[in-house]
Image: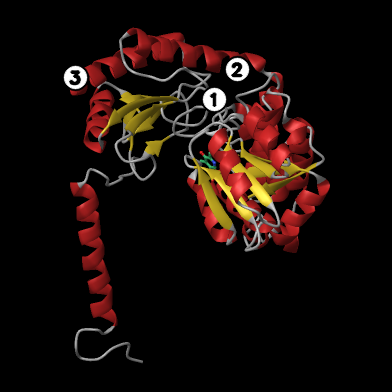
Amino acid sequence: MTTGGSDGTGGEAMVARLDAELRIELADLEARALLRRRRRVDGTQGPRIELDGRRVLCLSSNNYLGLADDPRLIEAAGAALLAQGASGASSPLISGHMAAHAELEELAAEWLGSEAAVVFGSGYHANIGTIGALTGPNDAVFSDVLNHASLIDGCRLSRATVRIFRHRDVDHLDELLRATPARRRLIVTDSIFSMDGDAAPLDEIVELAERNGAHVMIDEAHAVGVFGDDGSGLANALGLGARIAIRMGTLGKGLGSYGAFVAGSRALIDVLVNRARAYVFSTALPPAVVAAATAAIGIARAERERRARLWANARALHGALRAAGLRVEPLSSPIVPLILGSAERALAVSARMLEAGVFSPAIRPPTVPEGTARIRLTPLATHSSEEIATAARVIVEAAREIID
Ligand SMILES: Cc1ncc(COP(=O)(O)O)c(C=O)c1O
């Protein structure tokens, strides 16, 4: 069978044409300092990693509690691997809902103090699946302009009317709510914003939602394990858990594994199980990954000292950068962004840091808005005080060298 004629549109010619077009697109990204390259990590994720064959301090992962290489998670994953095998093998609605998933869902619900929970393949899946299952063309979704890409994509896929409110601006949200009648109105926000580390004004959002008859969904990706006495997230830390209908938490950040859960009422979870396309039409997580997350929740609840060390490290790093005269916003979470402006500048600071043995890549558009390229610094509970002091010194020297 032919796929084209003799005019250069045959199969091979088309492959070559696409390749040539893509090379031009890549060259354009490179020219604008926006090309991404992956680096290889050997060994495990921890406070230090082996990056492209070199041991460096890692100040860029979301492994906040340092659980990714914890022997107890590895042991739990190993035991599940032996008992339940390597794969979920099908969608949870076919035969993929295994003992490991059922146990994690029960534990996550209990931890958050909700009626029920459902485990999704990832935070990305959870966000697109949940927004799409709850809203459609007759509904409206209200979304903070700095929400994570997975919430943005969830809004787009839902086919609901989407209203974007200014970052953390409840007056703007109020205005949009009043001006947008709909069958169902859903406010979605990160609880801790992934690239800025600041917190959504959850108390005001909840009140506004209640006054306007709207529902609230929060993304606690950077808050589970990190906030609250028992690590169950920012909503619970603020005493708001019971007033927020939908809470999403990820398992691949503070909990050191992979996947995500959504917690809420039994009816909410049953609707998601029936209707969230990212749940229904995707293979269940491997039980080993799920069992590691279950072990991590136990540790995150019990070992408060981990959270204390995480926060102490964040305060030490933040304080050292401020004391050196670098402009950093007040600390709201363990995420410390150093905003540098242009992509070129952020790349230069990151490269200089790496030369001195500290890894944190430049975060550039479209991950962050134009003109706000940055180094996003994330200390872990498992960094030593000396490592934080070393990192701070290296970051300050690199920033001064490039900024001056
Ligand atoms: C705020 C936020 N939500 C959702 C996600 C997606 O979660 P996952 O990595 O599990 O897909 C991330 C990060 O990746 C995030 O930072």
Residue 201: x %, y % from top left: 59, 29
Name the one closer to the observer, 3 or 54: 3
Q: Which mark is residue 401?
A: 3
Of badges 1 and 3, the one in the foreground is 3
Residue 35: x %, y % from top left: 27, 47
Alpha carbon separation for disc pair 1 and 3: 31 Å
Report the amino acid beneath label 3.
Glu
Kindly identify which residue carries mark 2.
306
Q: Which mark is residue 386?
A: none
Task: Indicate the quadrant where residue 53 lies.
Answer: top left
Determine whether label 3 and label 2 are within 8 Å by CB: no
Determine whether label 1 and label 2 are within 8 Å by CB: yes
Report the amino acid beneath label 2.
Arg
Report the amino acid beneath label 1.
Gly
Q: Is residue 51 above or below residue 101?
A: above
Residue 320: x %, y % from top left: 38, 10
User: In the drawing, does residue 352 fall left or right of residue 68?
Assistant: left
Q: Is residue 23 above or below residue 355?
A: below
